[in-house]
Image (spheres, rainbow, N blue to C red):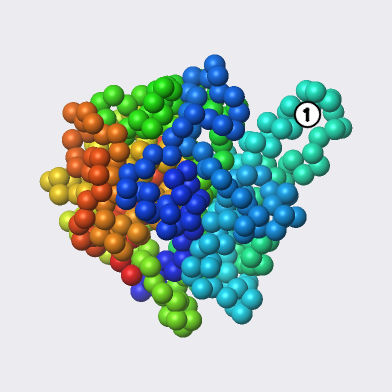
């Protein structure tokens, strides 16, 4: 059965290196780092005192003050990015059948900023003095609900929560909804705002955060021999996805084609990836097959590339396993070297980078890759962006619990 093509018609980004797609993309191409000492709270004494925070974010520019006050930060970031994506898509929501417009936007964690506030209030004031909106503001599916409320869309609305694969899985589910005939348009992506004391401390105690506190701009260094963990980040990435028929009927500009996806699970550990990368490789091959192309047709991979010892080496193995000798012809880059690890938002923001890379024929750099790890022996585009015609691009996302997701995009 021939499936209706799914296309990208709008994109929105909030990140530590740029708010809005254009500013974000310029910073990506320039290799700008968003890492700095944490300002959201005093990080003195934490294992990691650095993060990629979104600075100068004013939700009131796109969200009413009343609605904004009812949201945790992760929902504000999502709505802000969604409004930008809808504007770029030229989507006239009131003029469409709103029941045929869905929303699939997830977060790996949710409103931990609200939980921190609620706990502090409980300790100080005791029971019966908490925020009555703490629960609905905190739950991780509330970003999708907030987008729907603000845009007035009434189609399917939910969130996929799968750790660091969240953003990718949400986009994949959106594609399923469209190709199943359940929706014509789906607003999809991921969001996260976890630069909070509890989260930063928990990841620090886990030993996965960089402790290069004296030089934060150089701390996120995927595939580098001297990497010591990731830099936690925040942000949101949202796409407007729609069937090609729907986009064509309304005269929309197609920014890219969402060609395929692959999803697998290592089924091995709650935190450690399969050391051979077998199921990660399978996810990439499933995405390639779903898109109806061959492994040799892939030009670029936006790597998961977290800057942790295990992940980067395993991803290298997985790419070699999936692509064989063609792996040496691939251009690869890690957006996390610039924006840190945005957890539930990562897969969506990085998918946007893949679409923009194809559009402009630019592979964005992996910054801070100065001393390549011999175990990471592929072309990871160190230091500076590179121009190259790109036909098909993969975006990888791998989450705790062995959750693997690969997305395939082509040019519009």
In the foreground, 108 or 323: 108
Query: What residue do we see at 44% from left, 26% from top?
Result: 209
Image coordinates of residue 283 in percent, x first then y, are 33, 48
Drawn side of residue 323 relative to residue 142, left or right: left
Residue under label 1: 121
Q: Is residue 241 above or below residue 264?
A: below
Q: Is residue 344 above or below residue 103?
A: above
Query: What residue do we see at 45% from left, 81% from top?
Result: 251
Image coordinates of residue 19 in percent, x first then y, are 49, 52
Quarter assignment of residue 254 = bottom left
Q: Is residue 399 above or below residue 310?
A: below
* Residue projecting furthest to the front: 56
- Count the numbered circles shown: 1
* Residue projecting furthest to the top: 45
Element on which disc 1 rests: helix
Q: Is residue 284 visible?
A: no
Query: What residue do we see at 29% from left, 62% from top?
Result: 360
Drawn side of residue 40 relative to residue 249, left or right: right
- How crowded is the residue under tag 1: few (<14 C-alpha within 10 Å), some, or many (20+)? some
Image coordinates of residue 159 in percent, x first then y, are 57, 52
Instruction: Work out which quarter of the rendered image holds the N terminus and state it.
Output: bottom left
Quarter assignment of residue 172 = bottom left
In the foreground, 235 or 165: 235
In the foreground, 187 or 113: 113
Query: What residue do we see at 63% from left, 36% from top?
Result: 112
Image coordinates of residue 250 in percent, x first then y, are 48, 81
Instruction: Work out which quarter of the rendered image holds the C terminus and state it.
Output: bottom left
* Residue projecting furthest to the right: 128
Drawn side of residue 293 relative to residue 207, left or right: left
Q: Is residue 60 visible?
A: yes
């Amino acid at each position: 059965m021939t499936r209706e093509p799914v296309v990208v018609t709008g994109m929105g980004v909030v990140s530590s290196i740029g708010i809005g797609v254009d500013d974000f993309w310029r910073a990506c191409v320039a290799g700008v780092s968003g890492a700095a000492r944490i300002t959201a709270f005093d990080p003195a004494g934490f294992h990691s005192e650095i993060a990629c925070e979104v600075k100068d974010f004013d939700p009131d520019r796109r969200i009413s003050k009343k609605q904004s006050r009812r949201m945790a930060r992760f929902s504000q970031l999502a709505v802000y990015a969604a409004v930008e994506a809808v504007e770029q898509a030229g989507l006239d929501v009131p003029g469409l059948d709103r029941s045929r417009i869905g929303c699939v936007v997830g977060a790996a964690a949710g409103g931990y900023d609200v939980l921190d506030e609620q706990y502090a209030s409980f300790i100080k004031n005791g029971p019966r003095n908490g925020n009555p909106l703490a629960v609905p503001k905190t739950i991780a599916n509330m970003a999708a609900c907030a987008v729907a409320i603000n845009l007035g869309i009434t189609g399917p609305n939910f969130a996929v929560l799968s750790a660091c694969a969240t953003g990718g899985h949400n986009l994949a589910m959106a594609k399923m909804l469209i190709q199943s005939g359940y929706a014509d348009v789906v607003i999809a992506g991921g969001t996260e705002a976890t630069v909070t004391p509890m989260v930063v401390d928990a990841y620090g105690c886990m030993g996965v955060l960089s402790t290069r506190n004296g030089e934060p701009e150089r701390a996120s260094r995927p595939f580098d021999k001297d990497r010591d963990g990731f830099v936690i980040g925040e942000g949101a990435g949202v796409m407007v996805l729609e069937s090609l028929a729907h986009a064509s009927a309304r005269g929309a500009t197609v920014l890219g084609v969402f060609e395929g996806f692959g999803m697998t699970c290592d089924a091995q550990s709650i935190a450690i990836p399969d050391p051979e990368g077998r199921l990660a490789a399978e996810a990439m091959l499933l995405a390639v097959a779903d898109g109806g192309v061959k492994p040799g047709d892939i030009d670029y991979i936006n790597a998961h590339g977290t800057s942790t010892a295990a992940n980067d080496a395993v991803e290298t193995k997985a790419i070699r396993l999936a692509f064989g000798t063609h792996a040496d012809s691939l251009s690869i880059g890690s957006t996390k070297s610039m924006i840190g690890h945005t957890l539930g938002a990562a897969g969506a923001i990085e998918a946007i980078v893949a679409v923009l890379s194809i559009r402009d024929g630019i592979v964005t750099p992996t910054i801070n890759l100065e001393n390549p790890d011999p175990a990471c022996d592929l072309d990871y585009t160190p230091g500076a962006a590179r121009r190259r015609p790109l036909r098909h691009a993969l975006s990888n996302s791998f989450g705790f619990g062995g959750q693997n997701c690969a997305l395939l995009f082509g040019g519009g």
